């Protein structure tokens, strides 16, 4: 039995199933196995074996006739000759030229290789010609030109033209003319054009009222004619109890004079005072006086005094446990002081009050206007005063001990005024007194409310 395929343990050892040998294409008497695994004997006849002499060559083709060749056969082809390449330069046309390469080889077998011929040179001068004239700004194509030319230009000298004056102003127009071409950079200055103030200003400005910042721009002259004020005279003004404001009527700038009628005569009454009920350590004393309507000559009338004693206004005890200045004890009848020792001293001062009057021709101390300095230091000193009439002479002066303080004199009117001196140097236990004077007929000088206040 013939076998065409042998498999052992899953591995194919022999496989003839794809063989194509048959007896007709196997030389006789050779043997072989076909695809079925059957041994066959070749039947193909060899005839007379072929040799190299049976081969023929024509150009590059070698022909081998069919037949049996017992050994390898060969046939040589003719040898060729490799030529050297050349290049031919054509005629320049439109700034370009064609380069034509060529080579001549002799027919036959040629071994591969490279041969280099003689180079052909094309210079720029062969391809470009002519000159480009540049007569405007911008980018220029000079590819096909041998040169470029920029014609010379001429830089003009600038000038300025002065226009016509309009609305007090003028336009000055500069201009310059340059010829086309290359101009070397430099600076040229033309003739200056002068504009004077007289060219721009004209006419007259009329000024008829006072003022500041009056605009005179554009005018060559001004005329000032400011009229005087139109004043009014008023008469027959009736006096009243209230103040009056007298003004000029419409159409007038002011008043030239004012005449006020005389005041009618009146009668000055005698003043009285009524003491009210004590409340919260204070009592209201209401003064009143009845005067008849009319002009009253200035004088002083004194009614019956209303006495308010300290015992009526104060009560209770004020406990003081620390040192201090100006401790308020106005509403208390007694004080209890219990201050731990700290090396300090009291700076409290009594304030004198109440009006007192004198009628002398010399400075005279006023009863109740004398204070003793508690501690050496710097003080402010205050006092008040007025006089009962606008005629005569009056005044006051501060005395420290028996000496006047500098030359401090104060002249009072018939309105209450307050005097204040600052930075007065005083020594402990010195006596500070305000003295007053009144010189004249039938009037009195009042001085009251002396106060000294330590500042340092």
Image: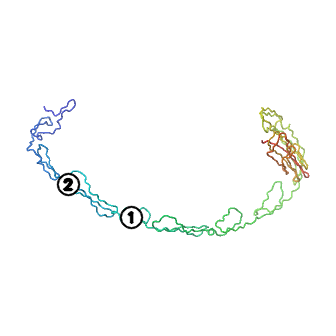
Residue 136 x %, y %: 44, 65
Q: Residue furthest left?
A: 47
The location of residue 248, given as percent across then percent down, is 78, 61
Q: Is residue 92 left or right of residue 288?
A: left
Q: Which quarter of the image is occupied by the C terminus?
A: top right
Element under label 2?
loop
Question: Which picture quadrant has residue 205?
Answer: bottom right
Q: Residue at x 12, y 43 (%)?
A: 71
The spot of residue 160 in percent (x, y) is: 55, 68
**If you read the primary sequence from the N terminus, does the residue marked by circle 2 or circle 1 appear first?**
2
Question: Relative to 66, does residue 18 appear above or below in the rendering?
Answer: above
Q: Quadrant of residue 247?
A: bottom right
Location of residue 80 with respect to 198 vertically, above or below: above
Quadrant for residue 284, please give it.
Answer: top right
Q: Which mark is residue 147?
A: 1
Left or right side of 412 for 160: left
Q: As displayed, is residue 88 above or below residue 21?
A: below
Q: Nearer the viewer, residue 433 or 257?
A: 433
Q: Is residue 287 in sight in this rendering?
A: no
Residue labelled with disc 2 = 81
Q: Quick one: label 1, few (<14), some, or many (20+) residues within 10 Å?
A: few
């Amino acid at each position: 039995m013939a076998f065409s395929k042998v498999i052992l343990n899953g591995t194919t050892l022999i496989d003839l199933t794809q063989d194509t040998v048959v007896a007709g294409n196997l030389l006789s008497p050779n043997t072989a196995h076909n695809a079925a695994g059957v041994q066959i004997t070749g039947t193909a006849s060899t005839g007379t074996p072929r040799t190299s002499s049976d081969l023929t060559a024509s150009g590059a083709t070698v022909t081998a006739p069919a037949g049996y060749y017992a050994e390898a056969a060969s046939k040589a082809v003719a040898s060729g000759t490799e030529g050297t390449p050349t290049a031919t330069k054509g005629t320049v046309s439109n700034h370009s030229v064609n380069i034509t390469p060529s080579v001549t080889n002799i027919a036959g077998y040629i071994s591969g290789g490279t041969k280099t011929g003689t180079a052909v040179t094309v210079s720029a001068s062969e391809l470009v010609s002519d000159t480009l004239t540049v007569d405007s700004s911008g980018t220029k194509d000079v590819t096909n030109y041998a040169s470029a030319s920029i014609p010379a230009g001429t830089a003009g000298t600038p000038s300025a033209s002065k226009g016509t004056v309009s609305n007090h102003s003028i336009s000055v127009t500069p201009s310059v003319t340059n010829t086309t071409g290359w101009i070397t950079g430099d600076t040229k200055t033309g003739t200056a054009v002068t504009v004077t103030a007289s060219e721009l200003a004209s006419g007259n400005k009329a000024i008829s009222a006072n003022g500041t910042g009056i605009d005179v721009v554009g005018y060559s002259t001004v005329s000032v004619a400011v009229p005087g004020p139109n004043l009014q005279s008023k008469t027959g003004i009736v006096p009243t109890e209230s103040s009056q404001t007298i003004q000029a009527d419409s159409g007038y700038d002011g008043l030239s004079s004012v005449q006020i009628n005389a005041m009618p005569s009146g009668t000055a009454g005698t003043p009285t005072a009524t003491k009210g009920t004590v409340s919260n350590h204070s009592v209201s004393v209401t003064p009143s006086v009845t005067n008849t309507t009319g002009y009253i000559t200035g004088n002083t009338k004194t009614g019956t005094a209303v006495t308010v004693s300290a015992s009526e206004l104060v009560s209770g005890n004020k406990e003081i446990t620390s040192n201090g200045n100006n401790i308020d004890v106005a509403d208390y009848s007694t004080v209890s002081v219990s201050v731990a020792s700290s090396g300090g001293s009291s700076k409290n001062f009594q304030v004198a009050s109440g009006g007192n009057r004198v009628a002398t021709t010399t400075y005279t101390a006023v009863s109740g206007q004398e204070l003793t300095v508690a501690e050496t230091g710097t003080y402010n000193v205050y006092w008040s005063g007025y006089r009962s009439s606008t005629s005569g002479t009056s005044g006051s002066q501060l005395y420290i001990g028996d000496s006047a303080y500098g030359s401090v004199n104060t002249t009072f009117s018939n309105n209450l005024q307050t005097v204040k001196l600052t930075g007065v140097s005083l020594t402990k236990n010195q006596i500070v007194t305000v003295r007053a004077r009144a010189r004249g007929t039938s009037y009195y000088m009042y001085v009251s409310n002396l106060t000294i206040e330590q500042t340092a």
